[in-house]
Image (tube, rainbow, N blue to C red):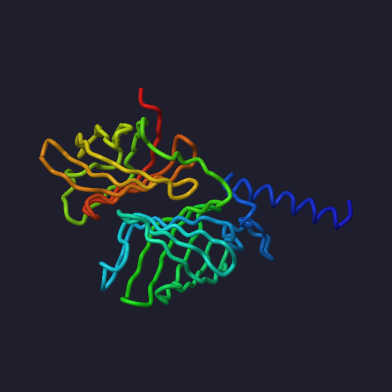
Amino acid sequence: MNLKHLLVNKGLLLSVACTLLLGTAVQSWAGSFFFSEGKRCHSTPKQLINATLVLQIEAMESDNPELYPGKGAIVQFYQNRHSYSTASYTGAAAIEGKAAYTYRRLARTRALETAQDEHTGQAYSTRYTFENASRGTWVRVYEDHNTTLSGRFSLSSAETTGVAPGTHAGKTVVLSVLSASSDYLPEGQFPTPGSAIFQHYAADGSYQGIGHGPGTVDHNGTYSAIKIAPNTVLEETQQTIPSINYTASYTMVYNYDTPYSGSWYQSFADGLIKFSGTFTVFETQ
C-alpha cells in the first residue's frame, strides 16, 4: 500500500471517529465536522447558511432591562453568508427583524458572530461555544445600554421539519427536574433536583400538573404553545396553585431530541424560579 492510500484510509478513519464523537446530529449542510491541520475533530460549523439557530434566554444583565428579552428564545434563520432574519419569542407575539452579520470560527469549539440590526442600527456580538455539532452555550453583548444575554442554543437545518410536534394538546409531558434555583425563595419552597412533574395538556387550552417529590405542588391553568424551530416548542402558561391561591405565568422552552424526548428550560414568574431538566412525552389515555 503506497503513501497516498495510507493517507486516504487514515482520513476515512478520522472521519468515522469524528462522526461518532459528534453524534448523529451532525449536519452536512453546515460542514459541522472537518479537520484542522492537526487532524482534530471540529464541532464548530464553517458557516450557517440554511441553518435555524435557537438562542434560549437564561440570563440577562442590563442597565435597561425593559428594552431586552429576559426570557423565552430568539430564533435566527440564516438565508446567506451576510444576513439572517430573527424572531424574538418573549411572552407575547414574536418580534421580527433582520440583521447583517459576519461569522467566523475561532477554535475547534468556539465561534464569533458580529451583527447589526437593519432597522435600529444596533450592533452586537455573540460568542458560541459548541458542545457538539448542534448544541452549546452562547453569550451576546449589545454595545448599547451595557447589556449581556446568555443561555444555551440549539442548531438545526432550516430545510427539515424536525421532530418537535406542532402542539402538546392531548399529550402528557413528564418533566424530570435536574436543576432548580431561586435568588428569592429558600430551598424547600420549589421543586428540587430529582423530582418530577406530570403535565396533562387538553385540546381546549387548559392543563393540569401533578408534582412528585420535595417542593412540588399540584397545579392547573391555561397554556399556549408554538413550534418556533424544527426541534423546538415554546410554551406560555398561566399557572394556578390552588393550595396557596397563587397564580403566575411562566415561559417554557422544549428542545426535542426525538419525537418523544428532549430537554427543557423554564423561567417561572419572570425569573423567580429557574428550572431545567429532561422530558418524555406520550399520548394521554
Q: Is residue 28 above or below residue 122?
A: above
Q: Is residue 203 left or right of residue 123?
A: left
Quadrant of the image occupied by residue 49: bottom right
**The residue positioned farthest toward the left in the image shown:** 244
Q: Is residue 255 left or right of residue 271?
A: right
Q: Residue at position x 16%, y 39% from top?
A: 241
Q: Residue at position x 24%, y 42% from top?
A: 191
Find residue 135 and report its horizontal and vertical position in percent: 49, 53
Give the number of marks: 0
Find residue 285 and report its horizontal and vertical position in percent: 36, 22
Q: Is residue 127 left or right of residue 271?
A: right
Q: Is residue 49 above or below residue 243?
A: below
The residue closer to the viewer here, 12 or 63, is 63
Quadrant of the image occupied by residue 120: bottom left
Find residue 225 and report its horizontal and vertical position in percent: 36, 44
Find residue 100 and report its horizontal and vertical position in percent: 51, 71
**The residue positioned farthest toward the top in the image shown:** 285
The residue closer to the viewer here, 29 or 33, is 29
Q: Residue at position x 60%, y 63% from top?
A: 47
